[in-house]
């Protein structure tokens, strides 16, 4: 299929915009939980371990869908999987607002996680085929920056509804159902199963799926190191986005709106960091040097959250983490996966990448809560997240990469 001459907006730009909005609503839906965790803790009499388990079970369901969604996308159609998942996502988010018990809330919350789990692999497979190769990292960065906007939107929506409109903690979930439905309809109308070919990306839309062996993805050294690195990066990231608003309320004495505002520094700054780091990676034609520069600063920033003795210092380290943390790192690693994965297994490779990465999101909320129950403070949980980051740095040292022509 060729790009039509009368198409005023190139298809790949439409793809970037719609998939950007997809990440906005996914992360906003997740993030409405964090500011209302104290209310949930009080209403149901939960320990910090049990409170962390809410997010851990959500991400367990999300993670378990990664590889099946990638495989189904490669075989049955990526668009079909995306749209079906988002329709279910809409339904479950709306249903949370009328959940009568904690058990039903948890069941619906896990189903929401499962419905989100079909997005990653098919989405990045479709966008990687649509975006011209010279813009692949930057295009993926723009898509991924939707995560930043979504986190901030979720924090503000939840805290504002509770503080100013005095709604129950369930109402922000209902409010998010409408934008999710809108994005599902946009994907249904505008996204194509095969991207049109362009001069910049002549192979798009013409490749055959071909046969591949699932085990071959584990034989690629660079893919394995990318999987390990994203696990380590996401662990620290989910400690921060899950627990930081709670930490600022309980251990720094901030009110819910102020805590949400401080915590949202990370996603807002990461928009700039994502674009700059991705641009540098594209200009270098290499991913490894950029990642090796970013991870040590992530380590420093996570330690700094605990060590900062003033609000100004805390803001400083959150700005640093936002600039070089997981959201900024992700498009660079996505490009590394796209560089090394076989075309016929692209959706599966991205699903596997996110499976390993999001496995960290299962452990991070619960382990951090368990450490807090054991030590009486969340500080040790942040220290542990920093040490996990070191493992990711070591893994990236083993990537073999030359400058791409």
Image (cartoon, rainbow, N blue to C red):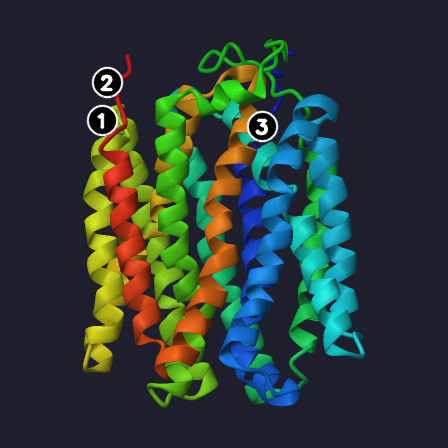
Q: Earlier in the sequence, mark 3 or mark 2?
A: 3
Asked which secondary structure carries label 3, the reply is helix
The quarter in which the N terminus is drawn is top right
Could one spot residue 145 in this view of the protein?
A: yes
Residue depth check, mark 1 versus mark 3: number of the one nearer the observer: 3
* Distance from Cα at disc 3 to Cα at disc 2: 25 Å
Task: Compare residues 351 and 90 and report the one nearer the observer.
Answer: 351
Task: Compare residues 82 and 160 and report the one nearer the observer.
Answer: 82
Asked which secondary structure carries label 1, the reply is helix
Percent x, y of residue 31: 54, 66
Q: How crowded is mark 1: few (under 14 residues within 10 Å), some or many (20 or more)?
A: few
- Give the residue at x 57% y 84%: 41
In this rendering, position of residue 262 left or right of residue 303: right
Could one spot residue 280 in this view of the protein?
A: no
Q: Pointer 3: what residue? A: 347
* Distance from Cα at disc 1 to Cα at disc 2: 7 Å
Percent x, y of residue 291: 26, 39
In this rendering, position of residue 42 left or right of residue 331: right
Q: Earlier in the sequence, mark 1 or mark 3?
A: 1
Q: Earlier in the sequence, mark 1 or mark 2?
A: 1
Percent x, y of residue 304: 21, 68
Residue 403: image tag? 2
Asked which secondary structure carries label 2, the reply is loop
In this rendering, position of residue 316 left or right of residue 6: left
Task: Compare residues 339 and 146 and report the one nearer the observer.
Answer: 339
Q: How crowded is mark 2: few (under 14 residues within 10 Å), some or many (20 or more)?
A: few
Compared with 213, 92 (above or below) is below
* Distance from Cα at disc 1 to Cα at disc 3: 26 Å
Percent x, y of residue 100: 80, 79
Residue 284: image tag? 1
């Amino acid at each position: 299929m060729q790009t039509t001459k009368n198409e005023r907006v190139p298809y790949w730009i439409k793809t970037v915009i719609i998939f950007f909005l997809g990440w906005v609503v996914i992360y906003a839906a997740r993030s409405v939980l964090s500011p209302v965790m104290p209310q949930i803790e009080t209403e149901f009499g939960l320990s910090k371990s049990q409170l962390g388990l809410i997010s851990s079970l959500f991400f367990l369901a999300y993670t378990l869908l990664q590889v099946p969604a990638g495989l189904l996308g490669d075989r049955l159609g990526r668009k079909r999987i995306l749209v079906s998942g988002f329709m279910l996502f809409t339904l479950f988010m709306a249903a949370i607002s009328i959940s009568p018990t904690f058990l039903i809330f948890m069941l619906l919350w896990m189903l929401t996680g499962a419905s989100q789990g079909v997005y990653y692999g098919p989405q990045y497979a479709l966008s990687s085929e649509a975006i011209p190769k010279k813009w692949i990292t930057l295009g993926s960065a723009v898509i991924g920056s939707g995560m930043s906007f979504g986190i901030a939107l979720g924090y503000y929506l939840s805290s504002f509804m509770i503080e100013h409109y005095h709604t129950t903690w369930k109402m922000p979930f209902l409010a998010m159902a409408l934008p999710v439905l809108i994005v599902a309809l946009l994907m249904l109308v505008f996204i194509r199963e095969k991207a049109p070919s362009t001069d910049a990306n002549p192979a798009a839309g013409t490749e055959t799926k071909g046969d591949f062996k699932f085990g071959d993805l584990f034989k690629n050294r660079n893919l394995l190191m990318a999987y390990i690195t994203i696990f380590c990066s996401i662990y620290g990231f989910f400690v921060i986005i899950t627990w930081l608003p709670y930490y600022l309320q309980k251990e720094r004495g901030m009110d819910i709106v102020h805590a949400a505002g401080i915590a949202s520094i990370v996603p807002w700054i990461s928009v700039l960091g994502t674009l700059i780091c991705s641009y540098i990676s594209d200009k270098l034609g290499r991913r490894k040097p950029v990642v090796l520069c970013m991870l040590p600063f992530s380590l420093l920033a996570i330690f700094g959250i605990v060590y900062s003795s003033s609000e100004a210092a805390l803001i400083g380290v959150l700005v640093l983490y936002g600039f070089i943390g997981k959201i900024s790192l992700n498009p660079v690693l996505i490009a590394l996966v796209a560089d090394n994965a076989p075309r016929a297994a692209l959706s599966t490779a991205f699903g596997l990448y996110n499976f390993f990465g999001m496995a960290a999101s299962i452990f991070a909320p619960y382990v951090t809560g368990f450490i807090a129950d054991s030590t009486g403070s969340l500080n040790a949980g942040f220290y542990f997240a920093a040490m996990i980051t070191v493992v990711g740095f070591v893994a990236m040292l083993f990537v073999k990469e030359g400058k791409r022509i």
